Amino acid sequence: MSQIPQTLTHWLIDAQRKAGGDSVMLQLLDDIATACKMISHEIAQGAMLGNLGKAGSENVQGEEQKQLDVIANDIFLAVNAQAGHYPAMASEELEDVYVVDGAAEGKYLLLFDPLDGSSNIDVNVSVGSIFSILRLPEGADPSQAAAFLQTGVQQVAAGYALYGPSTMLVISVGQGVHGFTLDRNTGLFYLTHPDMSIPADTKEFAINASRARFWEAPVKRYVDECLAGKTGPRGRDFNMRWIASMVAEVHRILTRGGLFMYPMDAENQAKGGKLRLMYEANPMSFLVEQAGGAASTGRQRIMDVAPTGLHQRISVILGSKNEVERVASYHAE
Ligand code: AHM
Ligand code: MG
C-alpha cells in the first residue's frame, strides 16, 4: 500500500488520543480549518468573484475595510459559531464582543484577525488569518470584553492560515508547531511541516524601514549594526525582508529563522504600537515560543502582558531567540 501523508483530521485525532480528555479541541480546530478553506477559496478567485477593492466602510481601528476583510470576518463568525463551543468571539473587524446565539454552554472564547495584511490583497501578495483560543474563565460573563482579557500564556491553542502560493494552516495546541498544506483537489489539509522550529541565530531581519525616523534608540542601534555588515559590530552581513503581511513574515521565520519587528515608534506611541495584542501578537508569540523562538515588546515577554482592551496595540519583536534577546538587552541598557 502506498503511503499518504497524514490529514489534519487524523493528526488531530492522534493529538487528542495522546493528550486524553474530550474531543472539543479537535472540533474547534477542524472548524477553524473549514473557515480558512472557505476564505482561501474567496481569495484565490480574486477579481473573478468581484471581491477585490474597498468595502466602503471602516473598522473599529478607523482603518478602511476591504471587501475581503468583511467576507473573511463573516465566514469566521458563521463557521465557528455553528458547533456552540464559543459563547462569544472577538474580531479585529468588530468593535465589541460578538455573542453567539444558543451557545451559552460553550467553554471557549475565540479571537481572530480574519484577514491580516489586507493591504496586500489588491496586489495579489500573501495574506493570512490569525486565531487565538482561550478558555472562558469560571463564572465570567462571555458577553463582556473582560472575559477575553487574559495573558497570552493562557492561550490553549493558536495558529494562522497563510494564503500564499499554497494555502497552509499552522497550529499549536501547546505541543510544538505543526504545518498543514491544503490540497485543492481533495479539499484536505495534509501534514507537511511537522515540528517546525526556529533556529536561535539568523542573518535576516524584517522591519518597515520607512519608519526609521520614528524608532526608539535601541531599535535604531540594532538595525544600524545589522546594516553595517561584515565590517560592523556584528561581523556578518544581514539580509532584510518586508512583506507587510505578518502571517507571511512569521511563516518565513518558522521556516528558516529571522527576526520580525513592528516596534514602538514615536508616531504609534499614543496608540501603544501598531499590531494588536489579542489576535495578532499573542497568537504569533505562542507559535514562535512553541517553535523555540522568543517574542518580546523589547521590555517584557509579550505573553506576560496583562491586557487592558480587546483591540489593544503593542510593540512586537519576535523570532530567532538570540536576536530577540539582543534587541531586548539594548532596551534594558
Ligand atoms: P492589518 O491587520 O490591518 O492588515 O495590519 C497588520 C499588518 C501586519 O500584517 C503587517 O506586519 C503590518 O500591518 C504592515 O504594516 P505597514 O503597512 O506599516 O508596513
Ligand atoms: Mg491584522
Image: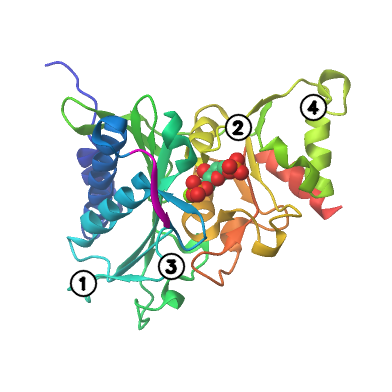
Which amino acid type corresponds to the residue marked 3 in the rendered image? Glu
Q: Position of residue 272 (x, y in %)?
A: 66, 62
Within 10 Å of disc 1 (Cα), the crowding (few <14, some 14-19, many 20+) is some
What colour scheme has been applied to the protein in the rendered image?
rainbow
Within 10 Å of disc 3 (Cα), the crowding (few <14, some 14-19, many 20+) is few
Q: Is residue 203 positioned above or below 109 on the image? A: above
Q: Is residue 197 left or right of residue 33?
A: right
Q: Residue at x 61, y 53 (%)?
A: 274
Q: Is residue 212 positioned above or below 281 on the image? A: above
- Is ligand 1 closer than 8 angstroms to the Cβ of mark 2? yes
In-front residue for pair 279/21: 279
In-front residue for pair 304/271: 271
Mark found first going from the N terminus, 4 or 2: 4
Q: Nearer the viewer, mark 4 or mark 2?
A: 2
| Ligand 1 rendered quadrant | top right
Between the residue at mark 1 and the residue at mark 2, the CA separation in whole angstroms equals 41 Å
Between the residue at mark 4 and the residue at mark 3, the CA separation in whole angstroms equals 40 Å
Within 10 Å of disc 2 (Cα), the crowding (few <14, some 14-19, many 20+) is some
The residue pinned by badge 3 equals: 95
Mark found first going from the N terminus, 4 or 3: 3
Q: Which residues are the magenta region?
A: 52-57
> Mark 3–mark 2 contact, CB under 8 Å?
no
